[in-house]
Amino acid sequence: MSELLLHCENLECVRDDRLLFRALNLMLHGGEVLQIEGANGSGKTSLLRILCGLRQPDAGRVLWRGEEIRQAREDYYADMVYIGHLPCIKGDLTTEENIRALLDTRSRSATLAAIEAALDQVGLAGFEDVPSKALSSGQRRRVLLAFLLLSEARLWILDEPLTALDVHGVALMEQMIMRHREQGGSVVFTTHHGMQLPCEMRSLSLAGGGSVADV
């Protein structure tokens, strides 16, 4: 079996005095894809934010390669990228400038040629100098896909990655996940839309207010 990357032990999350989940355990190895399922308000986004270190669990811990992410923060953030369901794109910046700004948050950079190649892969060739406020919501989402390609992260954590994407964009996202998996990367995601991946995909269902089976 491939290397164990992400390991969660007995996670508990309470929001607004309401228990979302408890005793949640999961293990994610290299090359695995995990979908977090559940109704609105069941705690999917809260769980992803805990996995990213943006929120502390009310109990339990999250480990990256055997070390708690709070202690392995530098290594973890170099290996993990999180994209929320709202596109973090600044309208006054061009497409290229937005990608560079996102890469800066990871202390990474890219040549113009690499950015152009990534934009070409996501269907935005020639949009380097276009102000992002002139892009459609689907095109803004594709800017994030170009950033994903350039991020060099081993773990992708994606909250509703298919939002605003058309049929071709959904197919592109699926292809990117498959390619990332084949290269040994791992993905944790949520979606209210169908994801058609030609591989074994695990799932974790959050019912809200109770324990969750180990995965």
Image: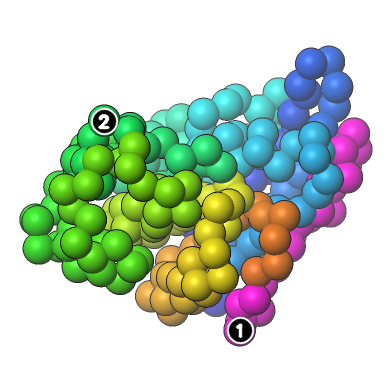
Horizontally, is 203 left or right of 105 in the view? right
Q: Where is residue 165 in the image (x, y as percent from the top left)?
A: 53, 59
Horizontally, is 133 left or right of 51 in the view? left
Residue 155 quadrant: bottom left
Mark 2 element type: loop
Which residue has dot 2 on it?
92
Q: Which of marks 2 and 1 is nearer the N terminus?
A: 2
Q: Residues within 10 Å of mark 2 (few under 14, many from 20)?
A: few
Q: Residue furthest bottom?
A: 198
> Mark 2 touching mark 1, by CB under 8 A?
no
Q: Which residue lies furthest to the top in this view?
A: 17
Q: Inspect this view and state whether residue 148 appears.
A: no
Name the amino acid type tagged 1: Pro
Horizontally, is 17 left or right of 5 in the view? right
Q: In this view, does 59 lie above or below 107?
A: above
Q: Which of 90/78 is in front?
A: 90
Label at residue 198 = 1
Could you tell me how far apart the alpha carbons at marks 2 and 1 are, in whole angstroms?
39 Å
- Is residue 206 one of those drawn in magenta? yes
Tell me the magenta residue range. 196-215
